[in-house]
Amino acid sequence: MILGLMPFSPRLRKGVQSLALSLLMAGITTAAVKIFGWKFWPRAQPTLRSATRPRAHALADDQRLVAVSAEPPIGVPAAKDGGVLVAPAPRKLSASDMFAAAKLARGRGDTTEALRLCKQLEEFFPNSPEGINAHVALGMLYLTLDQAELALQEFATFRRIGDPELKAEAYWGQAQALRKLARHDDERTVLTELIASYPRSAYVAAARARLGELSSDAGAR
């Protein structure tokens, strides 16, 4: 009561008016927000994560991750290795070059290399003269390795498909393989055919001598 009767000083009166005006504005603002939904604060800026979205996955990325094997040359069959087509290695030697290389390898005592080349000749050039003659060369190599059964097969193949003028060596090689296998009756038959078919062959003298040994062994028994 006493306070209400006391006069206000100009400064205090001004402060009270300012406080009343502030309260009035706050009330009006609160009412406006409730009625109209007004907002007076600034819109939130997007965060760094939303602003820097990850780059979309491009199709080119997938293509760089896929390994593509080279296509085989036209006309050359491709082999499968684990389901992937693999072009065969190109041949760099002709049949004549390969046969000459096998002969050189055999001459210097490199049996392994000579075997490899002769087998490739039979595989890559089976119908060429060199591929056919490789059967005799391979048979002789098998004889040096004491693989008489394999040698016998090679000589028999050459006698079936080889040049008749060159079969004397196949006859002699076949007789040698039969001798290693102790098939003396078959050996005698082949030696007899050799002498009858190729009387001028360089193997005839050795064939006659071997037939003499076989006859002596048979008489001794």
Image (spheres, grey):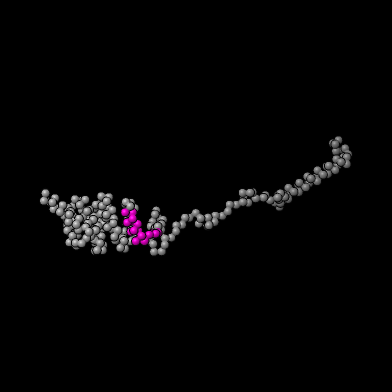
Q: Quadrant of residue 13?
A: top right
Instruction: Judge by depth and name the residue closer to the eye, 163 or 63.
Output: 163
Number of callouts in the render? 0
Residue 186 seen anywhere in this rendered image of the structure: no
Q: Residue at x 21, y 58 (%)?
A: 203
Q: Position of residue 7 (x, y in %)?
A: 88, 39
Quadrant of the image containing the N terminus? top right
The residue lying at 39 percent from left, 59 percent from top is 92
Q: Position of residue 126 (x, y in %)?
A: 31, 61
Instruction: Identify which residue is drawn at 73% across, 47% down.
Output: 30
Point 51% across, 55% down: residue? 64
Q: Which region of the structure is painted magenta?
A: 90-107
**Would you say 24 lies left or right of 111 here?**
right
- Nearest the viewer among 136 and 61 is 136
Q: Examine the rendering and report whether any part of residue 107 can be seen.
A: yes
Percent of width and height locating residue 41? 71, 49
| 91 falls in the magenta region | yes
Q: Quadrant of residue 196?
A: bottom left
